[in-house]
Image: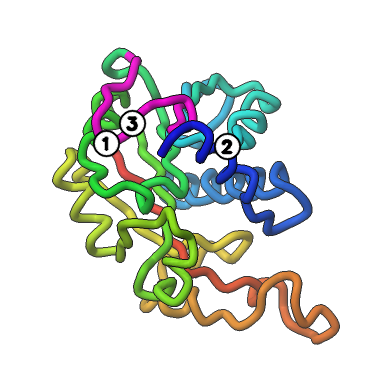
Amino acid sequence: MNKQFFKKYLLGYETYFSNRLDDVNRIFININRLLDHKKLSEIDKNSIVLDLGSGDGSFVELCKEKGIKISSVDGSQGVNFEKDQLNFNDNTFDFVIFNSVIEHLYSPNNILSEANRILKSNGILITITPNFEFAYKKFYDDPTHVHPYTPKSLDKILSVNGFLKNHLFPNLINKPKFMWDIPLKFYLASILPFRNHTFKNLPIPNFLRGKSTSMISISIK
């Protein structure tokens, strides 16, 4: 994809809450809640972070506002994730954020290997992508989606590229932490019946609002 296409594609980003910064702030909070849930270090001012596939730069902007040291790389900058080596030294980053990128790649082996290389020992790769088991009806509505993943296939592709400690969860926003650990968690996340912006006049508990057909992986180097 050329730079002009990327620019047009980024203009079509869907906003789920009030604006893009609100969206990425919820993602940031959710990542840290999940890291805390797994008793891992959270992303804070002491962290060195790379947003790999930074899109419109909203997540980078948010982190900078929080005083976090963050770098970014995106396909719109002319970087080919399937072929190019990243211009960073080995063992540089504490966290690499890989949000809604892997499903756009025919083969993620090169970029996952690069992510492993530039992460410090015990550094963490955060991967967010649709869970094809429950997102299959709409997955190809985005014409740039080329490779779907299930929890099993995502774990396998991460493992073969050097990430042997992978923890996969439904990507639930502002839900009780116990929902990350219950049996059939991906299925239950997909059927939580109501989105935040619907049925507002019905007495639906907040923790039931907002089904999720995406997944999030914490992968430790």
Identify the magenta region: 73-88
Quadrant in the picture for the C terminus: top left
In front: mark 1 or mark 2?
2
User: Does the residue at mark 3 contact the one at mark 1 (Cβ under 8 Å)?
Assistant: yes
**Mark identifier at residue 196:** none
- Quadrant in the rendering for residue 209: bottom right
In this view, the residue in front, 160 or 80, is 80
Residue at the image point whose x is 36% and y is 53% from the top: 103
**Residue 167 position within the rendered picture, expressed as x and y whole percent measured from the top left:** 32, 54
Q: Is residue 157 visible?
A: yes
Q: Is residue 60 magenta?
A: no
SS at circle 1: loop
**Mark identifier at residue 7:** 2
Q: Name which of mark 1 and mark 2 comes first in the sequence.
A: 2
- Quadrant in the rendering for residue 73: top left
Q: CA distance from mark 1 to mark 2?
A: 19 Å
In terms of secondary structure, what is the magenta stretch mainly? loop
In this view, the residue in front, 221 or 6, is 6
Residue at the far right: name it: 201
Quadrant in the picture for the N terminus: top left
**Residue 124 position within the rendered picture, expressed as x and y whole percent measured from the top left:** 36, 36
**Residue 112 position within the rendered picture, expressed as x and y whole percent measured from the top left:** 26, 37
Residue at the image point whose x is 66% and y is 44% from the top: 25
Q: CA distance from mark 3 to mark 1?
A: 5 Å
Residue at the image point whose x is 66% and y is 79% from the top: 194
Mark 2 Cα shell of 10 Å, populated few (<14), some (14-19), many (≥20): few
- Residue at image mark 3: 80
Q: Amino acid at mark 2?
A: Lys
- Residue at image mark 1: 82
